[in-house]
Image: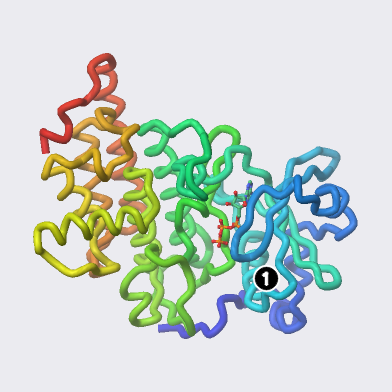
């Protein structure tokens, strides 16, 4: 087992260590990734004007801008690291080093970075449709965006699963994302989902073999999405990302944030006198429980009622609850999750072709 005390370190990149000590990206990375000047990013965001602010994460504010790259005008999202964020510097370097080396249709393209004076900025391609979280109306209450159809949700999950599968097995060395959640899945103008926020990601040894566990010094991530064994043993594997992805699938189905789903499931359990609240309850089994008791509409996104074909439901719930199994060995790998979700979508499309008018009003009685 390899022990990583920091989440960066790319032996195939020269200069990396000395640059990291100086909190600067390595010279080789600069060959792979644009370095923007602070002046051009200031200009492109109207000096980080409040009206250009499109979001805020733990890293700092995110601004929209427009910049000319190789003669082409591009809309960009600029993440500005807050100056008092000590922890952010390692995430900043980690994200550049990782994203500048990999390209995939389901990973957000990093266009470049800026490290000048006290300013540290990351420059991404702007994703017109925002985050999956925005479209599930999870962030800051209701935001009036058109709700996503069930098929669109499945397509988004398939794309995100593909991106995660690529990270685990497709790159030269396996990469664990470590921060999978709806807010870290962004959508381009064609609704193609892309994983973003690689600040916490870990790069393991050669991915030709099975992804190997990595021991971390401290637990980082978002509550509710972190796998139990990671929180208890400080060991991260590809199966911890699978667990987080399972939580995403439940949220996509319910259109509610983690806490709301978790408390609803606990309430139902309490009414049955079954068990005490437990953070790592298998949420998918909780949802199935609701449905079997004829209370599906209390937990599932109301927009989806009558829209999910029973055949699709079965495959979707099966893979979701397997992603959330307590024993990581029993969880599927991301490749299997991707295939099962594709299967679920195909079944939904077949059922829609037959029942285009009637819908699936009996789906929840059927189970
Ligand atoms: N490439 C992008 N295109 C369009 N909007 C973006 C892009 N990247 C980020 N955003 C917007 O900025 C917000 C903040 O993003 P960021 O990744 O910094 O934080 P987060 O993932 O929401 O939170 P945290 O960093 O705490 O996990 C997002 O919710 C989104 O609205």
Say above or below: 344 vs 183: above
* Displayed quadrant of residue 97: bottom right
The residue at label 1 has a CB less than 8 Å from ligand 1: no
Where is residue 61 shown, x and y percent of the image? 68, 58
- Residue 347 makes an appearance in the image: no
Q: Residues within 10 Å of mark 1 (few under 14, many from 20)?
A: many
Rendering coords of residue 72 (x, y %) = 81, 38
Colour style of the rendered protein structure:
rainbow
User: Is residue 217 in view?
Assistant: yes
Q: Residue at x 51, y 52 (%)?
A: 183
Residue at (26%, 54%) from the top-left corner? 264
Q: According to the image, label 1 marks what residue?
A: 93
* In the depicted structure, whether residue 228 falls above or below residue 350: below
Secondary structure beneath disc 1? helix
Q: Residue at x 67, y 68 (%)?
A: 92
Instruction: Tell me the quadrant of the picture where the N terminus can be found.
Output: bottom left
């Amino acid at each position: 087992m390899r022990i990583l005390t920091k989440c960066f370190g790319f032996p195939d990149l020269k200069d990396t260590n000395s640059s990291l000590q100086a909190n600067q990206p390595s010279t080789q990375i600069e060959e792979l990734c644009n370095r923007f000047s602070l002046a051009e990013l200031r200009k492109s965001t109207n000096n980080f004007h409040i009206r250009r602010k499109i979001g805020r994460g733990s890293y700092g504010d995110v601004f929209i801008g427009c910049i000319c790259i190789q003669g082409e005008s591009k809309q960009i999202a600029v993440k500005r690291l807050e100056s008092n964020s000590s922890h952010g510097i390692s995430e900043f370097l980690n994200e550049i080093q990782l994203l500048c080396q990999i390209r995939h249709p389901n990973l957000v393209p990093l266009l470049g970075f800026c490290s000048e004076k006290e300013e540290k900025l990351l420059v991404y391609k702007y994703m017109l449709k925002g985050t999956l979280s925005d479209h599930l109306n999870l962030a800051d209450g209701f935001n009036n965006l058109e709700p996503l159809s069930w098929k669109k949700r499945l397509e988004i999950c398939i794309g995100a699963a593909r991106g995660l599968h690529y990270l685990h097995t497709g790159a030269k060395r396996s990469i664990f994302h470590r921060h999978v959640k709806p807010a870290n899945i962004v959508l381009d103008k064609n609704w193609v989902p892309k994983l973003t926020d690689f600040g916490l990601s870990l790069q393991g040894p050669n991915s030709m073999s099975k992804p190997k566990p990595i021991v971390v010094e401290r637990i980082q991530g978002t509550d509710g999405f972190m796998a139990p064994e990671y929180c208890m043993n400080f060991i991260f594997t590809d199966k911890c990302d699978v667990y987080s992805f399972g939580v995403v699938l439940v949220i996509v189905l319910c259109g509610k944030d983690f806490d709301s789903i978790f408390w609803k499931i606990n309430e139902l359990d309490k009414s049955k006198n079954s068990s005490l609240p437990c953070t790592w309850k298998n949420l998918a089994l909780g949802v199935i429980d609701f449905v079997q008791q004829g209370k599906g509409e209390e937990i599932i996104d109301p927009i989806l009622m009558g829209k999910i074909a029973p055949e699709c439901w079965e495959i979707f719930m099966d893979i979701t609850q397997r992603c959330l199994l307590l024993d990581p060995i029993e969880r599927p790998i991301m490749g299997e999750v991707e295939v099962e979700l594709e299967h679920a979508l195909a079944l939904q499309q077949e059922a829609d072709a037959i029942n285009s008018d009637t819908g699936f009003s009996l789906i929840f009685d059927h189970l």
